[in-house]
Image (tube, helix red, strand yellow):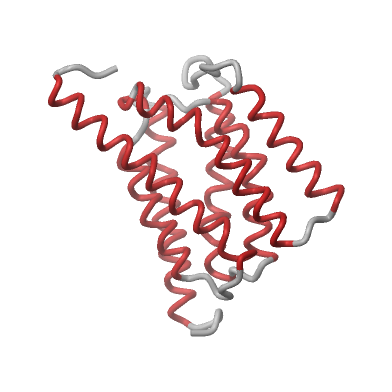
């Protein structure tokens, strides 16, 4: 199928709709006090989301970039909420601050050096993966502070986005594929830990 087929547009839109629904649920769970986002992760993701979504669009992802654009909007909203002591979690490790500096460096590099789309996608994936670590770490330690339904829905949305990618090139596929893997890893971590907590009758 070419990138502009109705099937790809439909998959891209469906993925974006699911991602938007998951985003609303995630924000709702934060406001209810059920989810506490890690501010370092979401701050980095806000910056890297610009690079990742841009690389997907520039690389020819077509409708496969819709989910990345929805995630970018979510990142901004969640990061702003995480700045409030009532809703967010502070950095839990000395190196968390270094992740934020990595993201800033990636954005500056992207803007100043005018990177080729493939290299920009690589920078986005590496920096975003580093930013994922604090949330993945806290998901293992405190699985009740993250929304399992939202992460599961995001995994499905990201997988649909991968299927909807228009041009199968590294530049267009790198960030959407990473999103699918990253979301699935966090969802899997939360699921495993909650089962363990239920079995062991203890959970942070």
| Nearer to the camera, 137 or 79 | 137
| Nearer to the camera, 24 or 129 | 129
* Direction from residue 167 to residue 98 in the image, left or right: right
Q: Residue furthest right?
A: 112
* Direction from residue 176 to residue 99 in the image, left or right: right
| Nearer to the camera, 132 or 26 | 132
Give percent across and percent down for residue 38: 50, 26
Q: Check the image and report above or below for 154 versus 63.
A: above
Give the quadrant of residue 43.
top right
Total marks drawn? 0
Give percent across and percent down for residue 145: 36, 25
* Residue located at (60% from left, 71% from top): 169
The quadrant of the image that shows the C terminus is: top left
Q: Check the image and report above or below for 178 versus 97.
A: below
* Direction from residue 194 to residue 150 in the image, left or right: right
* Residue located at (59% from left, 71% from top): 62
Give percent across and percent down for residue 93: 54, 17
Give the quadrant of residue 59.
bottom right
Give percent across and percent down for residue 88: 49, 21
Q: Check the image and report above or below for 68 versus 12.
A: above
Q: Check the image and report above or below for 148 versus 89.
A: below
* Residue located at (39% from left, 39% from top): 186
């Amino acid at each position: 199928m070419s990138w502009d087929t109705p099937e790809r547009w439909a998959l891209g839109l469906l993925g974006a709709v699911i991602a938007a629904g998951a985003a609303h649920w995630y924000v709702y769970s934060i406001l209810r006090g059920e989810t506490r986002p890690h501010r370092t992760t979401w701050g980095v993701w806000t910056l890297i989301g610009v690079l990742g979504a841009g690389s997907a669009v520039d690389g020819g992802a077509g409708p496969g970039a819709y989910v990345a654009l929805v995630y970018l909007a979510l990142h901004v909203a969640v990061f702003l909420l995480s700045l409030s002591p009532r809703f967010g979690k502070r950095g839990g490790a000395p190196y968390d601050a270094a992740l934020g500096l990595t993201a800033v460096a990636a954005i500056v590099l992207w803007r100043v050096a005018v990177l080729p789309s493939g290299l920009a996608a690589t920078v986005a994936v590496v920096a975003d993966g580093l930013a994922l670590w604090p949330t993945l770490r806290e998901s293992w330690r405190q699985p009740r502070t993250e929304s399992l339904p939202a992460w599961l829905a995001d995994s499905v949305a990201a997988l649909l986005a991968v299927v909807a990618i228009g041009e199968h090139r590294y530049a267009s596929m790198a960030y959407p594929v990473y999103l699918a893997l990253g979301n699935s890893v966090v969802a899997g971590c939360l699921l495993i830990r909650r089962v363990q907590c239920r079995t062991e009758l203890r959970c942070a």
